[in-house]
Image (spheres, rainbow, N blue to C red):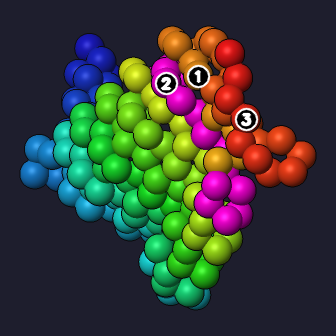
Amino acid sequence: MKSRRFLILLILLVLVLFLFLFFPNGRHPREGIRRDFYRTGGLHWEISYDEGEQNGISQEFYPDGKIKQIQHFEHGLANGLFQQYDADGTLTFEGIYRQGKPDGVLRWFDEKGNLKMEKNFRNGLLHGEVKLYHPDGSIRQAMLYENDHYVSDILFASMDGVPQKTG
């Protein structure tokens, strides 16, 4: 009987210690801003949490301190602007996410910052025009999608670079 009481008290003590260690001040362990650092001491990433879910801005950095990506979260899902940069600081991608899915125009850029491609999304599905660009900014090809299904080519550049309309 005494050993049983001792075992119950020991379990309760371990449970209370667990709660104090992992939930200080009654808060979830992932609360506020969390940071990770490179071995060299520079900031690697910074993520905002609210009640255990990513909420707010999440940022990742290159070892030299330049921004690698910025993403906005709401209730644990990507929600808002998402941007990625190369090591030189040039924007390589940007797009809007809503409830964790791409929604609106997503854009990709080359190493010089020139627009390479645009894709339109609606609720996570390709919907609207997809455009591919030449380095000079002219449209190389444009296609139409509806609800993630290819519909047709709208425009493409012929071998001599002259835009041609299709069906």
The boundaries of the magenta stretch are 124-138
N-terminal of the two: label 3 or label 1? 1
Q: Which residue is drawn at 73% across and 35% down?
A: 164
As drawn, 24 above or below 147: below
Q: Where is residue 3 in the image (x, y as percent from the top left)?
A: 32, 23
Q: Which amino acid does label 2 sit on?
A: Gly
Which one is nearer the viewer's eye here, 58 or 53?
58
Q: Are marks 1 and 2 in contact (CB under 8 Å)?
A: yes
Q: Are marks 3 and 2 in contact (CB under 8 Å)?
A: no
Q: How crowded is mark 2: few (under 14 residues within 10 Å), some or many (20 or more)?
A: many
Q: What residue type is labelled 1?
A: Leu
Q: Mark on residue 144?
A: 1
Question: Is 126 within the magenta?
Answer: yes
As drawn, 41 above or below 124: below
Q: Where is residue 159 in the image (x, y as percent from the top left)?
A: 89, 46
Residue under label 2, please give it. Answer: 128
Instruction: Calculate the distance from the C-alpha at mark 3 to the C-alpha at mark 1.
Output: 15 Å
Residue under label 3, please give it. Answer: 164
Q: Where is residue 98 in the image (x, y as percent from the top left)?
A: 32, 32
